[in-house]
Amino acid sequence: MAITLVRRRTEDTGLRPLKPSRDMFGVADLIEEAFAGEFDRSGRNALREMRWVGRWGFLLLWVDLFASDVNTNLNGFVWTDRGKIVGNTTISRNTADSKQWFVSNVAVTKSYQGRGIARQLMEAAIEYAKELRGKSVNLYVQRGNKAAIHLYQSMGFKYISATSLLYLPRVKAVETLPLPQGLNWRNHNLDDKDANAAYQLAKAVTPLNVQRERPLYLNQFHKGAEVSFDNFWRGMFGLGTARHWVIEDEPGQFAAMMSVEPGLWNSKHKLRLMVHPDWWGDLEAPLISAGLAHLKTCLRRPVSFQHPDEHAPAIEAYQRLGFKILRTHLWMKLVF
């Protein structure tokens, strides 16, 4: 299926569909310029792969012809000026029959910003999703990018949620803080009863609009023998054992959960925290401090993970304990 672009353009200047066989080098350079300083290891690897694709672009001539009809991450549009790529956006979906589309890498060279290029790239991506019978377009944008947020809002995108990336370069000794009285702190039992309690906690924690977008299922919260097996070989190689704690305010009713996951090989440590809204502000610091105390006994490496920005008491507690917010991404969605 070929999308029809109603745009005036001169030869090799203006808006056109992305051609993977010839555009990947230029797109990689543009993305590197636009998002300088934001790349982690996976981002740098993605750029390297894009340049590799550009080097072997002649192998992708079939994608140029059939990209609209295959499930590929190489669909998108570029804006060129006399052959140079100065704007880009990518649009993709997780499966070939999905009605939900995702826009990423919306980028315009700094000297070309303010000319309406980003809007036309977005309009083309939205038209593309509609032609392929999509029902919605999703995207992520940094909270500090006011111009982009204003553009997306003007096109009808609505806020869904926000996630902050937290980072601690080194775990230092911290004082473990006490819990309020009357609560029971224990290890996760790795059984169905605890899985159901975790599921109920997640439903209480997750905003309803987010649950409508990403429904929660009980099987997401099952933990079993794989945890013991994982910790066995972690111990064999001295990688530090994972911890899964729960706090009960009533038997079988979770007020909070914390998972502490020491990094494997070259990966970073992670903390995963859920606190029932009734206990916000009371349990975050005790659990985070205990998690850091455990990581202090593991291999020395940074701690990095994402956390829902709506959980403000947790973000504040992490910051008090030395974490920095590297960036906060807003999830926005346009429904047709």
Image: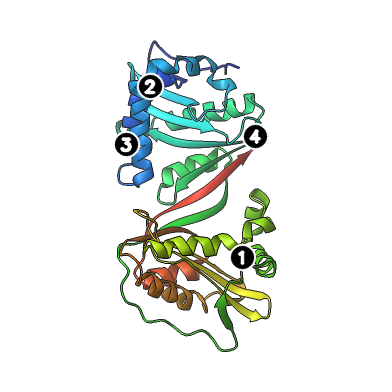
The CA distance from mark 3 to mark 4 is 29 Å
| Disc number for residue 98 | 4
| Residue 309 visible in the current orientation | no
Quick one: SS at disc 2? helix
Say whether marks 2 and 4 touch (CB < 8 Å). Answer: no
| Circle 2 crowding by C-alpha within 10 Å: few under 14, some 14–19, many from 20 | some
Q: Earlier in the sequence, mark 3 or mark 2?
A: 2
| Residue 120 visible in the current orientation | yes
The CA distance from mark 3 to mark 2 is 14 Å
Quick one: SS at disc 4? loop
In the image, 299 versus 84, the foreground residue is 299
| Disc number for residue 32 | 3
| Disc number for residue 205 | 1
Which residue is disc 2 drawn over? 23
Q: Relative to residue 335, is residue 173 drawn left or right?
A: left
Q: Amino acid at mark 3?
A: Glu
Q: Earlier in the sequence, mark 2 or mark 4?
A: 2
Q: Earlier in the sequence, mark 3 or mark 1?
A: 3
Q: Can you give x and y, in whole percent of width and height, for residue 163 in the image?
A: 49, 55
Quick one: SS at disc 1? helix
Q: Residue at x 31, y 35 (%)?
A: 110
Q: Residue at x 32, y 36 (%)?
A: 32
| Circle 4 crowding by C-alpha within 10 Å: few under 14, some 14–19, many from 20 | some
Q: Residue at x 40, y 51 (%)?
A: 144
Q: Earlier in the sequence, mark 2 or mark 1?
A: 2
The CA distance from mark 2 to mark 4 is 26 Å
